[in-house]
Image (cartoon, rainbow, N blue to C red):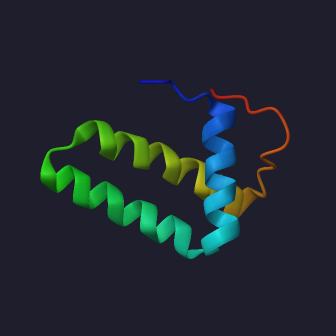
Amino acid sequence: MQDLSAADLCRLAADLTEEHGVDALDFARRAVVCFEAEGAMDRARFWTTMCVFLSDIAEFGLDPDKPVTLH
């Protein structure tokens, strides 16, 4: 399995936002709940991470074309 970089995740979140608008964050949040209920914790963690990027894009205008710094 290939690891995704922070830049890859940010670009994916930007693509989801471009395609689905504000609904993208809702989709991601529902995915977290569903995967947690199924016990698929790796998948739930992935979508939790996507929620962070989607939220930052929506709320703070995170630019996926600029370098991403994780703290």
Of all residues shown, which one is farthest toward the left? 38
Name the quadrant of the C terminus: top right
Whether residue 5 sits left or right of residue 67 in the image: it is left
In the displayed structure, would residue 28 be above or below residue 66? below
Q: Quadrant of residue 33?
A: bottom left
Name the quadrant of the N terminus: top left
Q: Quadrant of residue 66?
A: top right
Q: Quadrant of residue 20?
A: bottom right
Of all residues shown, which one is farthest toward the right? 66
Tell me what residue is drawn at x 60 percent, y 40 percent. Answer: 9
Q: Position of residue 14 (x, y in %)?
A: 69, 55
In the displayed structure, would residue 8 be above or below residue 32? above
Tell me what residue is drawn at x 55 percent, y 29 percent. Answer: 4
Whether residue 60 sits left or right of residue 28 in the image: it is right
Tell me what residue is drawn at x 65 percent, y 29 percent. Answer: 70
Whether residue 50 sits left or right of residue 57 in the image: it is left
The image shows a total of numbered marks equal to 0
Front residue of 60/68: it is: 68
Q: Position of residue 10 (x, y in %)?
A: 66, 44
Whether residue 16 sits left or right of residue 59 in the image: it is left
Tell me what residue is drawn at x 50 percent, y 53 percent. Answer: 51
In the displayed structure, would residue 1 be above or below residue 27? above
